[in-house]
Structures are given as C-alpha cells and as structure tokens.
Image (tube, rainbow, N blue to C red):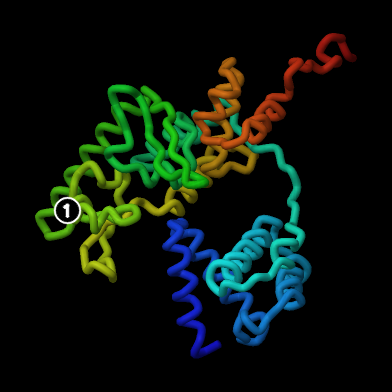
Amino acid sequence: MSDGAPRLLDQLRGAIRTRHYSRRTEKAYVQWVVRFVRHHGMRHPRELGEREVTDFLSSLAVRERLSAGSQNQALAALLFLYRSVLGCDMPWLGGLVRASGPKRIPVFLTRDEVRAVISRLRGANHLVALLLYGAGLRILEALRLRVKDVDLRANQVFVRRGKGAKDRVTVLPAVAQTELKQQLDRARKLHEEDLQKGGGCVELPFALERKYPSASREWNWQWIFPAHRTYVDRATGEVRRHHLHESVLQRNVHTAALSAGITKRVSCHTFRHSFATHLLEDGHDIRTVQALLGHSDVRTTMIYTHVLNRGPAGVRSPADRIALA
C-alpha cells in the first residue's frame, strides 16, 4: 500500500471532515486503518474481507489484550472506511459482535477529598479543576471554552459541541468568579500582545473562517485557557495559539491526589463524577443532573444512584440498626 496509502488516508480524512467529526476521531480512525493494513501485509482494504477483519479484531483482543473500548473503536473505524470511504456494501461488517467491557461503578471523591486535591493545584490548573468539579465539565470541554462561552452575570457556562456534538448549559460556580475574571484578564493581555506581533488567531469551527474572515482574531472567540506557545497553521499561514493541552492538567491532578494521600484512582474525570454524586446527595432531581451533565439517556445518570448506595428506596444496612460486639 506504499503508493495507495496517501490517497486512501486522504480520502478517509476528507470523509471524516465532511461529517464534522472531531480531530480526535480523525486521528484515531486513521491510526486504526493504518494498523489494519499493516496487519495484513500492506494489502489494500478492497482486497480484504470478513475473514481478515475478524482476524484483525481478534488479534486486538487475544494477542494485544486491548480493552473493549479500543476494540469497538477499531471496529467503528473499519465500518466507516468500508461504508463511507470505499462505498462497499458489506452487511457482515455491521453484524460483527462488539466487545463488551465490565460495568464499572465510577470513582468519586468526598467533598473533603475534592478540596484537598484542588487546593494543591496552582494557576490555570486550579481554575480548570474547579470548573471540572463545579460545573461537571469534561476536561476538553473546559479547556476548549472560549470567551463567549461564559456568562459571569448569569453564572452560566455554555458547552459547545460536547460529547456527541451536543450543546448544553451548566452552572458556573460562584466561587470561581474572581479567579475566572483574573484568567480572562491574562488571556486578553496575551491576545493583545499576539495581535501586535501579527498573530492573535484561533481555530474556528466548521466554515466560519470563510464566512467571517476576521472572526479568528476577535476577542470573544479566543480560548479562555490559551497555550503558552504559538504555531503556524499550514493551511492558512496564520500564527495561531491553541488552548492548553490536557496532559498538563492530568499530570498535575495525579500529583495533587498523591500529595493529598488519596488512595482512590483519581483522574480529571473523577471531578465530574463527584459533581453528579454531590448534587444527588444534596437532593437535586436526577433529570436536572442529567441535563447538567449532557446525558442523552437518564439511565446513564442513574449509575450515580448506585454510587450513593441508596437506590430509590433509600436502602440502609441492617448492621447499622444493631449493636455489634
């Protein structure tokens, strides 16, 4: 596939971008297609069929021992390749059994543990973690916030194109107001410096760059958490600034949790789990929590009632009602 690889991958990228999939999805799908072709000796996917696809997916499970999520992502990439890029009608491909992973109860922190972790973070890391917990945001939802996405007067955060390309509105914690204003001041100063140097651009969604050529330099489109370095966009030649990379916060949260002596497996997503759990503890309706989290199905939100160990009937252990020696 030495000659055909660039053409095939370009077709794949084009089909993904036409459907407005995320950059992460594009990167993942391209990697899986490359791995699939290499697994079969660089043969073109048109030459491969059900047996080869099944063999590849089986190797991921048996030899590489990848998680069910990774196996299903590989299957989704191959489904997209054959149906949307190659235009092949392969009914057997949609009938392949998807791997099922274990149903895990989400890890959440107590309020004291949340305080202990966040208090050990500094600068932008502290504010982002505060938004993850206080607004129930996913890590990239927080890092991709633009100036226009926060309403300080109404205490609201607008999440644009969250998971599943859905928009939603969630609460902006009042405790984050002062720190957020300071972060906006720093971001604005940096943006003005970039403009003076001939930069100050950010990436815009979809075709807005063509529709509004000057929008990429406007303040309301800038990232609230800009990266420290700029880059030159290959397509436009513009000097741009991306948002902070998620790995920076992930490392700092991990270090803070260890420093706080917390033995639970803590990640940035743990703050979102804690947000949902604590809202339910405070008596908020599960439909309200569902809307704030952006879940399509309330059954996804229901898992947090299991975390509470109370269920609809408010079950209490019988051991709590007797004195044990």
Work out which quarter of the rendered image holds the N terminus and state it. bottom right
The residue at 76%/69% (across/down) is 58
Question: Residue 276's spot in the image, x, y percent?
Answer: 57, 29
The relative height of residue 322 versus residue 159 in the rendered view (above or below) is above
Q: Is residue 179 visible?
A: yes
Place of residue 101 in the rendered image (x, y in percent of width and height, measured from the top left): 74, 51
Q: Is residue 170 left or right of residue 288?
A: left
**How far across and down, in percent of the image, does residue 210 sit?**
24, 58
Q: Amino acid at mark 1?
A: Ser
Q: Is residue 317 shown above or below 126?
A: above
From the viewer's perspective, is residue 35 above or below residue 128? below
Residue at position x 24%, y 67% from top?
Answer: 236
Q: Residue at x 35, y 42 (%)?
A: 145
Q: Nearer the viewer, residue 238 or 167?
A: 167
Image coordinates for residue 107, horizontal then vertical, percent: 64, 37
For residue 197, which quarter of the picture?
bottom left
Position of the C terminus by quadrant: top right
Considering depth in this image, is 109 or 243 the residue closer to the camera?
Answer: 243
In the rendered structure, the answer to whether residue 117 lies left or right of residue 41 reads: left
Q: Is residue 258 left or right of residue 56?
A: left
Q: Secondary structure at mark 1?
A: loop
Residue at image mark 1: 214
Residue 60 lies in quadrant? bottom right
What residue do we see at 38% from left, 32% from top?
157
Give the residue at the far right of this rendering: 325
Does any portion of residue 126 appear in the rendered image?
A: no
